[in-house]
Amino acid sequence: MSQGNGNGMHPARAEADSPSARTPRFWPFKRAYYGWAVVLASFVASFGEVPVNGPVIGVFIRPMQDELGWSRGTIALGFMIGSIVGALSSGIVGWLVDRYGARLVVAIAGVLITVSLLGLSTIQEPWQFWVLFGLGRGAALSGVGIGTTVAVGKWFHRRRARMLAIKGIGHRTGQVVFPVFILGIMSVADWRMAFAASAGVAAMLITLPALLYLRKQPEDMGLMPDGATQSERLHELDSEVSWTLQEARRTRAFWLIVVFTVGTPFVLGATNLHLVANFQDRGLSDALAVSVLSVFAAVSALSMLPVGLLLEHMHVRHGAMLMTILLMASMLLISVADSYAEALLFAVLFGVTTSMRVIIETLLIANYFGPRSLGTIRGFARMWTVISTIGPVFGGFTRDITGTYTLTFLVFAAAAGLMFLAMLFATQPVKPDHRWNEDSFG
């Protein structure tokens, strides 16, 4: 859709400073709303970061144990360190994205992930794994994760949920493709070569698209969110209120959202890491155990857009409550699943749950507190997930001690119940000079 300048500019300068004139030269669709370029770059970057995520690193656990003799807890400690780095850096990264935009933040994160994966192909000692994986995972969680979600959140308002869903499909598609890619490399080489090959993919899919296409916000290009006209945007602003971080922190809803935000990586992150190893322990072959991962990721990817559309027509708090119910059910199921059919049923439930999480965590901040300080508020809330980092290590050491993951998943089911209670009471806050009801927010 073509856009007018909408800023009172003198007609003689309109053509030279039109949105199309400010569109990056490598974007071929000059008449399309540029927000699509931001979504595409975010989709691709989310795909490329997957090798330092839990489900994919889980594929490396068995071969690394066989060669290096490390325990599950030792490997999970690297995952924990990466999560701590991501959590503690989220506050400053969120502020940087609000202040300067996501372009350089995501590009630098891509470089760090590439260096991390190359280094992981040469490791010999646990400390090397902890440092390198910690670097890569931290860059993915804060740099790519916050950078892309905030970028999409600023470029879209009415269609924010579906665009976050499209971005999330890139992440889940990567979780479908990368395990097969890694197993294929391991079949002809080894896990070290799989790390090196993943580094090349990350360099091409994160850093390059970010530099070419990510831009801070539509207003910088003479555009409006969703490609709206200026009059349409002014009408939307009547119902959209932006809070500062200081204002948000004074609300009950913010701290209940923090509880929810802490709970999701505690449960989902640890389950992602140990999923493949759990089903291998329960007697599934390596191929079948990895296929459960691929099915869950495929279900998550396929359900992402329908979930996004659904969340545009229901309050995000209700969506979060539904998500926690599905999460509790999936944790109870995986705690007893010992057949392939039960594993596939878990994969379906868990896949839908994770697709909801990808969208809901950002929507809770964006829809409750507005887009202006989205990165700063999202980053501050995410800093508290440093508490969540005990989840993967708890799972690894519990398995080392008890020989199974059963206790781990029962604890995670209880955590999902606590998340439900947090969302039950996290009603929409109202600024003193504004009024709206929950139904006005999709």
Image (cartoon, helix red, strand yellow):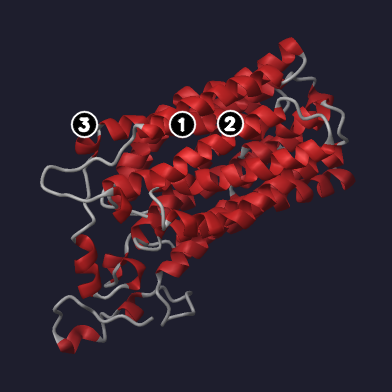
- Residue assigned mark 1: 420
Mark 2 vs 1: CB contact within 8 A: yes
Which quadrant does the C terminus fall into?
Answer: bottom left
Type of amino acid at the residue the image marks with label 1: Phe
Asked whether residue 124 is in view, the answer is yes
Tag on residue 322? none
Q: Where is residue 321 in the image (x, y as percent from the top left)?
A: 46, 38
Q: Position of residue 437 (x, y in %)?
A: 25, 49
Q: Residue 328 carries which label?
A: 2
Distance, label 2 to label 1, CA atoms, is 9 Å
Disc 1 residue crowd, few under 14, some 14–19, many 20+, Cα 10 Å: many
Disc 1, SS: helix
Observer-nearest residue: 237 or 105?
Answer: 237
Q: Residue furthest bottom?
A: 12
**Separation of marks 3 and 2 at Cα, in angstroms:** 30 Å
Pointer 3: what residue? 250
- Using residue 410 as the reference point, say whether residue 215 is left or right of it: left
